[in-house]
Amino acid sequence: MSATYTKQTDADDDPVTLMLQKTGCLDKHYKVQECIAETQDWRQCQNIVKEFKDCMQEYTEKQRQKYSSK
């Protein structure tokens, strides 16, 4: 191996993580996971889930506008 080789983390190899990075919603995704892990009840995390959902919807709408204007 060359000296310029840099090891990628598992997260860098995960296609879901890569997709969420592109959307700008990765931090909200992590917050949902963290809340569910802490509370063990997704129903207690609905405000965080809504933030993530809103972020994804905003990204989807921007993409739709981007491609419909071409």
Image (cartoon, rainbow, N blue to C red):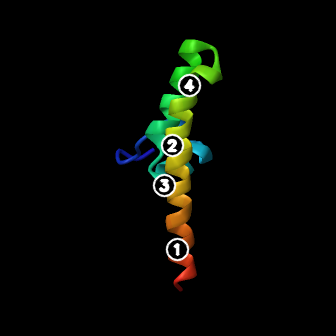
Whole-angstrom CA distance, mark 2 to mark 1, is: 28 Å
Q: Can you tell which quarter of the image residue 36 is in?
A: top right
Badge 1 marks a residue whose secondary structure is helix
Badge 2 marks a residue whose secondary structure is helix
**Percent x, y of residue 12:** 51, 43
Q: Is residue 12 visible?
A: yes
**Percent x, y of residue 69:** 52, 83
Q: Which residue is at the front of the view, 42 or 26?
A: 42
Looking at the image, residue 2 sits to the left or right of residue 56; the answer is left
**Percent x, y of residue 25:** 48, 46
Nearer the observer: mark 3 or 1; the answer is 1
Whole-angstrom CA distance, mark 2 to mark 3, is: 12 Å
| Residue behind mark 1 | 65
Q: Residue at x 64, y 23 (%)?
A: 42
Whole-angstrom CA distance, mark 3 to mark 1, is: 16 Å
Earlier along the polypeptide chain: callout 2 or callout 3? 2
Q: Is residue 18 visible?
A: no
Whole-angstrom CA distance, mark 1 to mark 4, is: 30 Å
Amino acid type shown at disc 4: Cys
Badge 3 marks a residue whose secondary structure is helix
Earlier along the polypeptide chain: callout 1 or callout 4? 4
| Residue behind mark 2 | 12
Q: Residue at x 56, y 44 (%)?
A: 53
Whole-angstrom CA distance, mark 4 to mark 2, is: 26 Å
Nearer the observer: mark 3 or 4; the answer is 4
Q: Residue at x 56, y 61 (%)?
A: 60
**Taking 20 as reference, is 32 above or below it?**
above
Q: Residues within 10 Å of mark 2 (few under 14, many from 20)?
A: few
Q: Which residue is at the front of the view, 49 or 12?
A: 49
| Residue behind mark 3 | 22
| Residue behind mark 4 | 45
